[in-house]
Image (cartoon, helix red, strand yellow):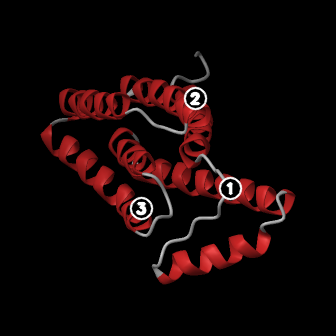
Amino acid sequence: MVGVHLVALCMFVVCGYSDLRYRCIPNLVLVSACVVGITLVAVNAGAKAAANAFLGGLTLSLPFFLLYRCGGVGGGDVKLAAAIGILLPCELGWKIVAWGAIGAAGQSLVQAVILRKFLDLVRSTTHLVLGSGGVVQGLTVPLGFWMSAVGVAMVVGTLVQCTGGTL
């Protein structure tokens, strides 16, 4: 499944750059990656594996969708999580999303301290957990960039491992 990993790698590079530079993750890239990924999985492993990949995308994007509905993340982050779930094995996808979220949380803490908005961040997080939205003016954290950066590292590691280090 090296082809699917290469598609994921390209998606991570484009999405990470776009989220960091423009604060937007392009739908065209995400939809294309999902379609190509499901097609490659179906061709290489069959329809059942393609259906499992689709379900993986739904499963991985669900927590992000709930955060999106509360105002905690953008729509591109939800779609990026879905694409990760479609393109990569479940365990690897969850690791990418978790480490990406940890990176974004760390960045938001540093920004809050630098901008002296730490109490605003705590209040915002409390409101987000309670479901009433949670945005702090002046704090911009590109979660898609963090998921993409972690994704690049993990996919390259997986490719090196799959090819026996001959990449």
Query: Image quarter for residue 108?
Result: bottom right
Residue reaching furthest to the front: 137
Image quarter in which the N terminus is found: top left
User: At 76% across and 62% down in the image, what residue appears?
Assistant: 109
Q: CA distance from mark 3 to mark 2?
A: 21 Å
- Residue 72: x %, y % from top left: 50, 63
Mark number for residue 128? none
Q: In the image, 138: left or right of 167?
A: right
The residue beneath circle 2 is 17
Which of disc 2 and disc 3 is earlier in sequence?
Answer: 2
Mark number for residue 68? 3
- Residue 119: x %, y % from top left: 76, 76
Residue reaching furthest to the top: 166
Image quarter in which the C terminus is found: top right
User: At 18% across and 47% down in the image, what residue appears?
Assistant: 51
State which mark lies toward you, 3 or 1. Answer: 1
Question: Mark 2 near mark 1, Cβ–Cβ under 8 Å?
Answer: no
Please name whichever residue, 99 or 28, is drawn nearer the observer in this view of the structure: 28
State which mark lies toward you, 2 or 1. Answer: 1
Disc 1 residue type (three-letter) = Leu
Query: Image quarter for residue 43?
Result: top left
- Residue 15: x %, y % from top left: 49, 32
Which of disc 1 and disc 2 is earlier in sequence?
Answer: 2
Q: CA distance from mark 3 to mark 1?
A: 17 Å
Above or below, comparing residue 17 to residue 101 in the picture: above
The residue beneath circle 1 is 139
